[in-house]
Amino acid sequence: MNCKNCGGLTAPDASGSVLRCRFCESVYFLGAGEGPDGLVLTGPDIELDCPRGCGSLSGGHIDGQPVAGCPACRGVIASAMAFGMIVTNRRKRWSGPEPIPMPLDAESLHRAAACPGCGYRMETHPYYGPGNCVIDSCGHCKLVWLDAGEVAIIERAPGRR
């Protein structure tokens, strides 16, 4: 599929549920519903802005854990505690195939994102558990930002369940 924004080529990410444009990084979700991460937006908009510049975040949950999500890019912000619970529970329940991990995108380590909670710059780093993805975290607010599909990458990664 060609990108509707720039006409460039899109490719599925490791979760298989999202297409990303290789040129402008637009995101297209395959199918309807919650998306690859199980994000359910319940609204209303809250007073936090998307670190990717999309606008206001909306209240929601993943597997009953409270999170905020971006209706545009489907990124998720969660407390470190909620993130830990989501990862633990999702990895325990996953019984599907374990995809071959894709190499980490080194370019994504150079992005800059302001924390929606305090405005300080978030730390951009590889997730240090199973799954090759880059996450953003704020040591000050104890918040974790995950781009669309990253919860699914962590959930399905090979390794101990």
Image (cartoon, grey):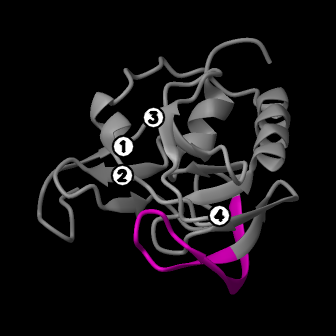
* Crowd around label 4: few <14 · some 14–19 · many ≥20 (10 Å): few
**Would you say 5 lies left or right of 64 here?**
left
Residue 12: assigned label: 1
What residue is at 77 percent from the left and 29 percent from the top?
91
Q: Amino acid at mark 1?
A: Pro
Determine the secondary structure under disc 3. loop
Calculate the distance from the C-alpha at mark 4 to the C-alpha at mark 2.
15 Å
Determine the secondary structure under disc 2. strand
Q: Amino acid at mark 3?
A: Ala
- Give above or below for 155 relative to 142: above
Q: Amino acid at mark 2?
A: Leu
Calculate the distance from the C-alpha at mark 4 to the C-alpha at mark 3.
17 Å
What residue is at 52 percent from the left and 49 percent from the top?
122
| Magenta-drawn stretch, dominant element (helix, strand or loop) | strand
What segment is highlighted magenta in the picture?
39-58
Which badge, 4 or 3, comes first in the chain's sequence? 3
Calculate the distance from the C-alpha at mark 1 to the C-alpha at mark 4.
17 Å
Question: Does any portion of residue 15 appear in the rendered image?
Answer: no
